[in-house]
Image (spheres, rainbow, N blue to C red):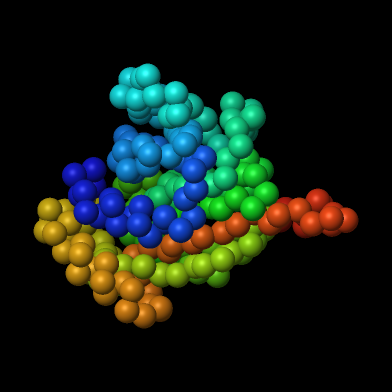
């Protein structure tokens, strides 16, 4: 999907309300979305593939506002200590993380009070198919499941909605019914993005290919306790 420029810009536009000036990008990958966030005051990208980190460091050498770290965020955040992130962003990443709850809690810890987390993940367990498994998806999310994980991590969920209903129907046919394990027609799909984007805003759709969430780390109130409900793993 790196060549799907309209689609990638649409991803960023859906997440933009939660993207601030000092940004933690969780799962930079090959830098597809990173390239659309170059104007930030600070961008720190984390990634678990060494080759991707090396390439991004070479690409953005000489840009002190852009840093990239080889970090599994679900296992520890020591390499990211000291940054004052006002936001975090992640698109199509958390479904690849075995312990996604730990990763969300790590993002919460790294954000400044009042900071926002803009997150896009694949939706609907019933859409999980061979293509998901072939590209390393552990899960697809229901709206209730994603909200519960974010709240358990400490966030207040400001908005959570399904997005791209046409894409969901296409996934249903191609992945679930036909059992395809490769994406096709990316160029055509990319040309359709302006129409898909307009359709997406017409109503609060009851289904979609993705879930888009904007969550916020609460600001500390005078006299309030910093203790949170002990973590319990979802079954």
Determine if residue 172 is in view.
no
From what the image shows, is residue 143 above or below residue 114? below
Tell me what residue is drawn at x 52 percent, y 67 percent. 159
List x then y, in percent, for residue 149. 60, 59
Question: Would residue 177 be found to the left or right of residue 11 on screen?
Answer: left
Picture quadrant of residue 217: bottom right
From what the image shows, is residue 61 above or below residue 233? above
| Count of number-bearing discs | 0
From what the image shows, is residue 201 above or below residue 134? below
Which residue occupies the foreground of this view, 174 or 79?
79
Which residue occupies the foreground of this view, 86 or 232?
86
List x then y, in percent, for residue 56. 35, 27
Question: Would residue 183 be found to the left or right of residue 102 on screen?
Answer: left
Name, please, the residue furthest toward the right. Answer: 223
Tell me what residue is drawn at x 57 percent, y 40 percent. 85
Tell me what residue is drawn at x 31 percent, y 38 percent. 35
Tell me what residue is drawn at x 35 percent, y 25 percent. 60
Question: Would residue 99 be found to the left or right of residue 38 on screen?
Answer: right
Determine if residue 141 is in view.
yes
List x then y, in percent, for residue 206. 40, 78
Q: In which quarter of the image is the C terminus?
A: bottom right
């Amino acid at each position: 999907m790196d060549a799907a420029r309209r689609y990638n810009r649409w991803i960023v536009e859906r997440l933009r309300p939660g993207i601030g000036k000092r940004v933690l990008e969780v799962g930079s990958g090959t830098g597809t979305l990173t390239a659309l966030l170059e104007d930030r005051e600070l961008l720190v990208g984390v990634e678990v593939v060494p080759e991707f980190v090396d390439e991004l460091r070479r690409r953005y050498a000489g840009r002190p506002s852009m840093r990239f770290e080889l970090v599994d965020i679900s296992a520890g955040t020591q390499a990211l200590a000291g940054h004052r992130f006002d936001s975090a962003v992640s698109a199509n990443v958390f479904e690849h993380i075995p312990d996604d709850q730990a990763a969300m809690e790590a993002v919460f810890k790294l954000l400044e009070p009042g900071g926002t987390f803009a997150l896009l993940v694949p939706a609907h367990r019933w859409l999980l198919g061979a293509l998901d498994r072939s590209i390393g998806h552990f899960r697809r999310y229901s709206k209730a499941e994603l909200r519960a994980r974010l709240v358990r991590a400490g966030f207040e969920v400001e908005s959570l909605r399904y997005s791209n209903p046409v894409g969901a129907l296409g996934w249903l046919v191609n992945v679930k019914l036909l059992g395809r394990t490769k994406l096709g027609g990316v160029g055509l799909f990319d040309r359709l993005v302006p129409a898909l984007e307009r359709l997406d805003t017409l109503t609060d759709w009851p289904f979609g290919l993705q879930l888009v969430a904007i969550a916020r780390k609460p600001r500390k109130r005078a006299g309030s306790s910093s203790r949170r409900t002990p973590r319990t793993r979802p079954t």
